Amino acid sequence: YVTQTTLSVDETGEIITALRARFPDIHAPKREDICYATSNRQWAVKEMLLEIELLLVIGSRNSSNSNRLVEVARAGGVAAHLIDDESEIDETWMDGVDIVGVTSGASAPEKLVEGVCDWFRARGVSDIEPYRLVDEDVEFRLPVELRRELALAETQQ
């Protein structure tokens, strides 16, 4: 079997359990199919749910992993909203809420997260703390052909 890389970690586990029960000789992939960034964010959201009352997920509406983060929060009993950026925050969401969690889909640029934090700062929030469950230090190198082309272009300047 193979799995889609942006599926919910929990749902994927349930599906694999059912597959193994039905097909005891089924073969698993040699390595994890679910993207490490997707998995890390889902686990972080689950941990955050114990401390927050509302979760804002920064990401595109067509981003599977961003939508999964909203689903994970709601399944854990915490209100969650998917937003493209700070312009989509509805101040009424904050009514009766003391602690808000902010996360982003795997491909959301850091500047969007900063924009949401700045939105809160502009409204008097001074206690903004990073929540790190896992430090993501995976680095993706450009293919060797592109590295060569870039090196050549630099020498020609």
Image: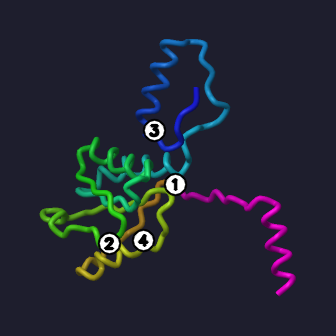
**Which residue type carries mark 3?**
Val
Precedes in sequence: disc 3 or disc 4 = 3
Precedes in sequence: disc 2 or disc 1 = 2
Please tell me whether mark 2 sits on a helix, a strand or a loop.
Answer: helix
Precedes in sequence: disc 3 or disc 2 = 3
Q: Name the residue under label 3.
A: 9
Identity of the residue drawn at 42% across and 66% down? 130
**For residue 29, above or below residue 5:** above
Q: In which quarter of the image is residue 98?
A: bottom left
Q: Name the residue under label 4.
A: 112
Identity of the residue drawn at 33% across and 50% down? 70
Precedes in sequence: disc 1 or disc 3 = 3
The foreground one among 54 and 155 is: 155
Residue 95, given in percent of the width and then of the height, sits at 13, 65
Q: Give the range drawn in magenta.
A: 135-157
Q: Distance between the residues labelled 2 and 1?
A: 25 Å
Q: Distance between the residues labelled 3 and 4?
A: 25 Å
Q: Nearer the viewer, mark 1 or mark 4?
A: 4
Q: Name the residue under label 2.
A: 86
Residue 24, given in percent of the width and then of the height, sits at 56, 12
Instruction: Count neighbours of disc 3 (C-alpha within 10 A) and say few if under 14, some if 14 to 19, many if 20 or more.
Output: some
Q: What mark, if any, has residue 114 been given in the picture?
A: none
The colour scheme of the drawn protein is: rainbow
Please tell me whether mark 1 sits on a helix, a strand or a loop.
Answer: loop
Q: Which of marks 3 and 2 is in front?
A: 2
**Which residue type carries mark 4?**
Leu
Q: How far apart are marks 1 and 4 (CA)?
A: 20 Å
Q: Distance between the residues labelled 3 and 2?
A: 28 Å
Which quarter of the figure is the C terminus placed in? bottom right
Which quarter of the figure is the N terminus placed in? top right
Residue 150, given in percent of the width and then of the height, sits at 79, 73
Q: State left or right for residue 18 relative to residue 49.
A: right
